[in-house]
Amino acid sequence: MRYMIIVKMTEPSPPPSPEMLAAMGKLNQEMVEAGVLLGGEGLQPSKSGAKVKMEGGKLVVRDGPFTEAKELIGGFWIIKADSLEEAVGWVKKIPMWNEGEEVEVRRVSEVEDFIHDDISAEALDREKAQRESGAWPENR
């Protein structure tokens, strides 16, 4: 199973220190060596982003920055783990905890999670072939 680890921020923060970057690099290397790391990145500040929302039947674009702390995501990892407990174990190794900060762990949906009568075996096979061909970012 794949899990997304979402690193939330309580407030905009400066770029990580060299020591923090080294600690994060060490954790990333540990995950690579364990064969669980599929991807992960830090995100630019919200001032360089946008949100798109449906309002009154129209798509409305709101440029950053986003002022509410609950809206800020600092980065993410996608990992392979056998259980939520295993994924949480990796989260506990993150070196950058500040008071009030939160990390969310969510299972990534797989094709099989959407199987129902309206989806053919052919469609599922195409999806898997796309993923395995390298067309998906996790395979690059």
Image (cartoon, rainbow, N blue to C red):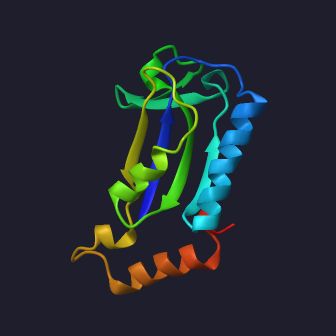
Residue occupying image coordinates x 55% and y 44%: 76
**Residue 15 percent across, percent down from the top left:** 72, 25
Residue 51: percent from the left, percent from the top?
A: 52, 29
Percent position (x, y) of residue 116? 23, 74
Which residue corresponds to the image point at 62% horizontal and 57% vertical from the top-left? 30
Q: Is residue 46 above or below residue 106?
A: above
**Residue 41 location (% of width, % of height):** 64, 45
Number of marks in the image? 0
Pick out the residue farthest to the left. Answer: 117
User: Which quadrant of the rendered structure holds the C terminus?
Assistant: bottom right
Q: Residue at x 72, y 37 (%)?
A: 21
Residue farthest to the right, as pictured: 18
| 27 relative to 125 in the view: left or right | right
Residue 48 in sight from this viewpoint: yes
Residue appearing at x 65%, y 25% in the figure: 45
Which sits in the foreground, 83 or 68? 83
Q: Quadrant of the N terminus?
A: bottom left
Residue 137 makes an appearance in the image: no
Query: Vertically, is 100 above or below 76?
Result: above
Instruction: Depth check: give the residue in front, 24 or 104.
Output: 24
Q: Nearer the viewer, residue 118 or 29?
A: 29
